[in-house]
Amino acid sequence: MISFYRHFIFLLAAMLTPLVVGAETITVDGAYARASSKLAKSAAAFMEIKNMSSTEDRLLGARSDFAKRVELHTHIKSEDGVMKMRRVAGGLLVPGNGNLMLQRGGDHIMFMGLTRPISDREIIQLMLIFENAGSFEIEIPIHLKEMAASGSRSLTHTHSHTHKNSTKHKHTHSHLDKH
């Protein structure tokens, strides 16, 4: 009888192993979206994407019902020295054991053709699409005002997602939100 239980436990452990193989490799911190007013037709999202794997990954795109189009953008200096925003084709590299900063004046996610008015501190859903890690949804707060350098407060957001070879699960992140 003891032999039966040992085999049963071994079999059970073997069946659960694929869930562990799909362990989380991508995390998102400090996510927020910014628009200039409640009447804005566009907005941008910023965040830090961390790759916990030694294998590089690529952010291929994003989706949200918050806008008609969601694109990856960057700023490029033109020949006349003026910074211009451009769509990024082919995605943004997230190096192995590294991070990708989506920030003002650099790489970011652009929402164009907002589908409804927005409110300060509202939470929106954003689907991030990665080449290796797959797709997962995050919740990000809207800020209508420029984030100030002083006056920090703690902000917590939760996102749920599924990785390859795993089940859907939730994460709650706390970070300082400068306001």
Image: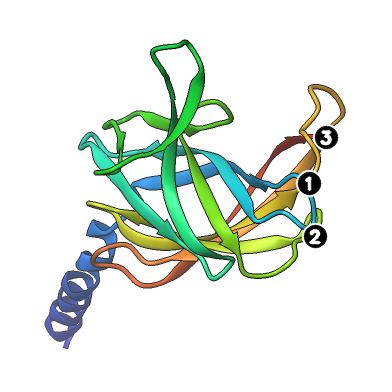
At 42% from the left edge and 56% from the top edge, which residue is drawn? 62
* Marks 1 and 3, how far apart at CA: 11 Å
Closest to the observer, 131 or 153: 131
- Mark 1 and mark 3 lie on one chain; the one further toward the N terminus is 1
Is 88 situated above or below 12?
Answer: above
Is 155 situated above or below 64?
Answer: above
Is 118 situated above or below 51?
Answer: below
Quick check: marks 1 and 2 in contact, CB under 8 Å?
yes
At 35% from the left edge and 72% from the top edge, which residue is drawn? 167
Q: Nearer the viewer, mark 1 or mark 3?
A: 1
**Amino acid type shown at disc 2:** Ser
Q: Quadrant of residue 152?
A: top right
Closest to the observer, 44 or 31: 44
User: Which numbered disc covers residue 144?
Assistant: 1
Which quarter shows the N terminus? Answer: bottom left
Q: Secondary structure at mark 1?
A: loop
User: Which numbered disc covers residue 119?
Assistant: 2
**Residue 123 in picture, x, y percent from top left:** 70, 61
